[in-house]
Amino acid sequence: MTKKDLVAHVADKTGLTKKQAGGAVDAFLAGIMDALKAEDAKISLVGFGTFSNKLRAQRVGVDPKTHAKKTYPAKRVPHFKAGKTLKELVEKGKKGKKRSAAQLRKELHDAVAKFRQEAQAESTKQTTTARPE
């Protein structure tokens, strides 16, 4: 989903125009970004998740061009931890249950078989109605 899709979704669900929904989405994102500027920022949206800052420690890496060791300084990075409700929603998916690869293959096989039967029945129906007697 892109920002454009999100704006369209907000507009559809709230009855706002796309311009108004775009302003609401922009204001929401700006609020989160402004709050994350603080060193000990934490934004909790119950059921959705928590935005915060984390300190990434100093590390030693390798410069890909020269293959020389390079020290990367410590820095703050944004972090998101999904809430329980969001995790459960993603785990269950749209149908409400998790399906294995074998189940998905079987469902696909069954759908293809059903399509072939319907196509064959339609073909038989057309050939029998097309012949004059």
Image (cartoon, rainbow, N blue to C red):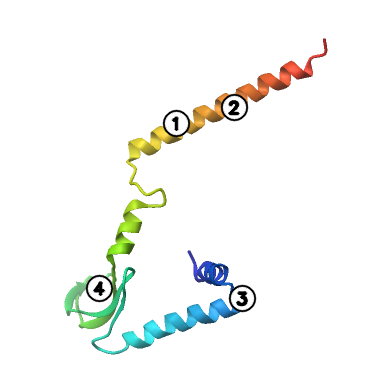
What crowding class fits label 2: few (fewer than 14 Cα within 10 Å), some (14-19), or many (20 or more)?
Answer: few
Distance from disc 1 to disc 4, alpha carbons, whole Å, reads 50 Å
Q: Which residue is mark 4?
A: 63
* Residue at image coords 34%, 40%: 101
Of pointers 4 and 3, the one earlier in the residue sequence = 3
Distance from disc 2 to disc 3, alpha carbons, whole Å, reads 43 Å
Of pointers 1 and 4, the one earlier in the residue sequence = 4
Q: Taking 30 as reference, is 85 above or below it?
A: above
Tag of residue 109:
1
Residue flagged by tag 2: what amino acid is it? Glu
Distance from disc 3 to disc 1, alpha carbons, whole Å, reads 43 Å
Determine whether the residue tagged by mark 4 lies in a helix, strand or loop. loop
Q: Taking 87 as reference, is 103 above or below it?
A: above
* Residue at image coords 34%, 69%: 48
Residue flagged by tag 1: what amino acid is it? His
Query: Which is nearer the eye, 97 or 36?
Result: 97
Of pointers 2 and 4, the one earlier in the residue sequence = 4
Residue flagged by tag 4: what amino acid is it? Asp
Q: Which residue is mark 2?
A: 118
